[in-house]
Image (cartoon, rainbow, N blue to C red):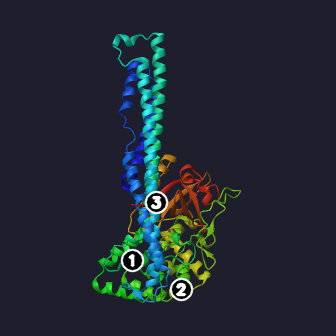
Amino acid sequence: MAGVLRGANESAAERAERLAGLSERMLAAGSKNDLLDLIDLAFSEPPPEGDPGTLEALGRRYRDQLDEVMSLHDRVDKVARKGLPEVWVGDTSVLASDAVSAVARAVSDMADAFAGGSRALIVLADAILDAQSQDGVGRGKLRQALNEMGSDREGFFDNLRENDEEEWDRKNAAHFASYGVGEMRKAVLAAGEARRVAARDLNKWASEARAGKMDSDELSPVDRLMLADASGAKGAAEYNEILSANELERSGRAMDNLPPADRARMELLMTNTSSPQEKAYLMKALAAGRSVDEIDEFAYKIQGKDPAWLQRHLSPITTQGDSLKDEGTNANGSSVNTDDQTFDGQKWIQGGDGSEGTCVASSTVTARAMVDPLYALELTGGPSGQEDDPGAFRQRLVEEQHRLHTEGDGGANWGGMGPEGQERIADDAIGGATGDDYQRHDMNNADERRQVLTDVEKSVAEGKPVPVDVKSSDGAHAMTIIGQEGDMLQIYNPWGTTTWVSEDDFINGHMGKASNGELNDAYSVYVPQ
């Protein structure tokens, strides 16, 4: 269903613009026949599409499943709390107690998805019903306009002279008709926005159905469940899952496609790990397109490391549980609730200290490190993979930023980069690990930002970072959209910070909350296709 909804928003914006022009032309119509032609055009516009009854019934059906899901959750939770014996299950040796706890969390997530999907569909049904009612009011005004001046067309000689009464009737009818078209336009916009929000929520809930994303015959259901459940040691678990929805799907498919000998090596590597997190990072490497030879070397470097070490070295972004809290803005308009992203105290920041203009390259480096754990370890752990030296990390980070800046034909003295270079390095560095072709979408106004937002949110919900360019009257800056929760977008700024902005901030030019309060207008995004 979400795929159908995605295309509706663009046509809604186009139709709204057409109706706005039609409304203006009605007020300027110089004859009765001209006005009648315009009214005919208005009547030919289709009403907001959708069957509220069907949508509501589907939403209620999802809601009715909740009782069964919650009953299952209660039964699993009882088993999880009984204290299971230390037995191993699955192909890659997973403690039964850990597996049952993961089942309990998966069932809880399933309940949330059913509830969220049900709510999204019922809200959409109500919104479509309201929009269709408003469209009906607008069409009623069109009929009132016809009654006011009559629907019979004038002949050639009638058109030559219009008396005062006829002119009054025509102008009065024009106002009724213009108002009616205005109501139809509001209905189109309301229905389009409702579809966009429903698509956003349904896409998000689809990505949250994590346990089913890894469809591999080479791993047991227990193993797939544990991999989907694995998260970092720090931050809120639901915001710091190691494998994104896209990575779960890609790694499962890659596992199935491995030659038998490589598949056996991967299974052995997984069996020899000491934690679910360690297993998850091996599969994340497979999802990033790494060979089994590369993963074998990587596995040796991280073998036996505790979850905190793994997260610090392999995940550049940690999202705190309170990061979504709205704490207002600073005096310059930037968000108060901003988190530093560091490795041993050294920020993931452009130029190592924020002084250079390598924002495009720096954003791309961090985005790739988010989706490729071998790349992240090369930066944090050095050649041996064992280093915990913030100074050495800084040197490697800046060198890699400079390399990508040069590859993207960036400016001299580590200055700005053009859009062609930015798209190319996003394709190579990020798309090479996610399996996507990144394409630039320019945005000149709020409507164009609203149109692309569904694709942006679907991408980040699946775990695919989306580069975004912002500007002010004094300059431009590159950042990356890395997460989405409800109507909020998580932004990584290569000044070494993350924060959340609202959809409204993105659409209506308030992106300065993620930087210095001035870089407000999002004018380009690079979306995976």
Is residue 284 in sight in this rendering? no
Local crowd size for mark 2, using a 10 Å CA cut-off: few (<14), some (14–19), many (≥20): some
Label 1 residue SS: helix
In the image, what residue type sits under mark 1? Arg
Of the residues shown, which amino acid type is indicated by label 3? Ala
Q: Residue at x 47, y 28 (%)?
A: 178
Task: Indicate the secondary structure of the residue bearing disc 3.
Answer: helix
Indicate which label's residue lies in the foreground, 2 or 3.
Answer: 3
Q: Which mark is in front, 1 or 3? A: 3
- Mark 2 vs 1, N-terminal side: 1
Q: Is residue 411 left or right of residue 10?
A: right
The residue at which mark 2 appears reads as 306
Figure quadrant of residue 205: bottom left
- Give the CA distance from mark 1 to mark 3: 24 Å
Quadrant housing residue 426 = bottom left
- Which residue does the numbered mark 1 point to in the structure image? 224
Residue 249 screen position, x and y as percent: 37, 71
The answer to whether marks 2 and 3 mark residues whose Cβ atoms lie closer than 8 Å is no
Q: Secondary structure at mark 2?
A: loop
Depth check: give the residue in front, 198 or 252: 198
List x then y, in percent, for residue 515. 62, 60
Estimate the spatial distance between the alpha carbons at disc 2 and disc 1, rounded to whole Å: 21 Å
CA neighbours of label 1 inside 10 A, class few (<14), some (14 to 19), many (20+): many
Residue 383, image x, y percentages: 50, 86
The amino acid on which the numbered mark 2 sits, given as a three-letter code, is Asp
Residue 78 vs residue 524, the one in the foreground: 78
Quadrant of the frame with the N terminus = bottom left
Q: Which mark is residue 115?
A: 3
